[in-house]
Image (tube, rainbow, N blue to C red):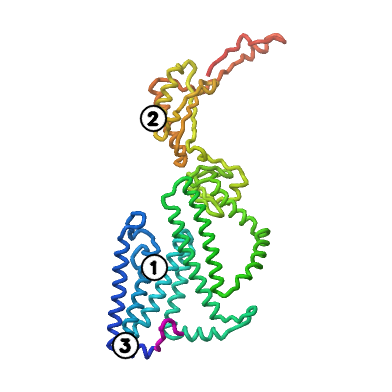
Amino acid sequence: MNTAGLTTLTLTEFLNALRHPSALIEIAVALGCLLLAWAVVRALRGKPAADGAVATATQPSIWFGRRIVDGVLFPALALALAFAARRIMLGFGLPLAVFKIVVPVLMSFALIRLSVRVLSVAFPASRLVRAAERTISWVAWLAVVGWITGVLPQLLEELDQIRWKLGGSEVSVRNLLDGLLSGGFVLVLTLWVSAAIEAKLLAGAIGEQLSLRKAAANIVRSLLIFVGLLVALSAVGIDLTALSVLGGGLGVGLGFGLQKLAANYVSGFVILAERSLRIGDMVKVDNFEGRITDIATRYTVIRALNGREAIVPNELLITQRVENASLADSRVAMSTLVQVAYGTDLDTLMPQLEAVTREVPRVLSDPGPAVQLSNFAADGLELTVVFWIADPENGAGGVRSAVNLQLWRTLEKLGVEIPYPQRVVHQVDRRAAVSAPLGATGPSVGSLPHQV
């Protein structure tokens, strides 16, 4: 198999070529290409990015990676320099041996870095990315070994002989492998472009902008993946006119088996478009309360204040009642109760309780707290202290506890009594009750009321 003049060598030919003095020149040139590529990538990584920030090694970039050598730019630039150096040496008539290994190795390295980096950015939370990285690495390096040893070209020739009829055309196993590789490469490029567009759309977005840009990013990614899939099918050799039959079957499948999945996808786009739910809103769905952290095309992630997360299908958010505490206003009213003894001067006490409640951190001054006489209870006067907070996502227990502590300290300072439960017990003298005439009413002579 010949590709751009790359030919294979037998092991004996390769060892004989290494004894030639030009082999040392090839090794020096290959090392020079690697050092030059490393220096260029390092210089480019330190330049200001498009948004004015400086790219650092800690930023997980597709081009640069976390380090210089684990990005896409380093092997791609080294491969380009190796191709250029190879052409120059061929122009001088030097025999090549080392570069017949260097070029396939760099090509495989660039393919691995491209696939792994794109998959990591496109699916950052997926556990399958690591397995995909190992699989791609093993396949790529085995292909390099097979190419260098000459086994791969012979294997491809044998696979090309295995043919069968597929419709009106003849297809071989080699055609399918070439098509799968081409289709996979197209899909990787599609994911790369969609991930770059999504990162640009979501950069610096908050609130409503974040939800709108998230919807746009999901639409762009779906369209690009669909176009990439069509291009990949064309690369494999599948006639796209046959997709009309596939589309009919897909419609039947969506109408029966995939109707829930389709409903969730449609509901996701509806939620993002009408902005009834936004990332960052405090909601309560199906007795689960928390903050929306992500709205995907199929589901929405809600994180409770205790750290638990719920993955809610988008259809549930459309068809059921959802309590949104942040739809029109993020401020939330809270209240606490306190009782004081009868006879307390409420006209003097209530303004003081409002003042100390306003001093609690996280309690808003507009609207400010209010103290209301809510009930004439059995044991005392019941006061309701109402106050507002603007950050319900930080929890309610802490701010309520702080308000209660302020109220208790104020009542202790002013000497206001917090009444204990009181009950009146009547003790009846049984002997007096027996000697009383029949039909007598009212308390007996020996009846003594006691207050406990």
- Looking at the rendered structure, the secondary structure element under dot 2 is loop
> Mark 2 to mark 3: distance in Å?
86 Å
Amino acid at pointer 2: Glu
In this rendering, the label closer to the viewer, 2 or 3: 3
Q: Which residue is mark 3?
A: 93
- Looking at the rendered structure, the secondary structure element under dot 3 is loop
Q: How many marks?
A: 3
Task: Specify start and end residues of the magenta stretch as a single range.
Answer: 1-10
Q: Position of residue 395 (x, y in %)?
A: 46, 40
Q: Position of residue 356 (x, y in %)?
A: 40, 27
Report the residue at 44% width, 64% height from top: 118
Residue closest to the eye, 236 or 288: 236
Callout 1–callout 3 Cβ contact below 8 Å: no
Picture quarter containing residue 323?
Answer: top right
Q: Position of residue 451 (x, y in %)?
A: 53, 16
Amino acid at pointer 3: Gly
> Mark 1 to mark 2: distance in Å?
56 Å
Q: Which residue is mark 2?
A: 359
Horizontal placement of 255 versus 216: left or right? right
Horizontal placement of 55 versus 192: left or right? left
Q: Position of residue 12 (x, y in %)?
A: 37, 91
Q: Which residue is mark 1?
A: 72
In this rendering, the label closer to the viewer, 1 or 3: 3
Q: Main secondary structure of the magenta part?
A: loop
- Looking at the rendered structure, the secondary structure element under dot 1 is loop
* Earlier-in-chain disc, 1 versus 2: 1
Amino acid at pointer 1: Val
Above or below 400: residue 229: below
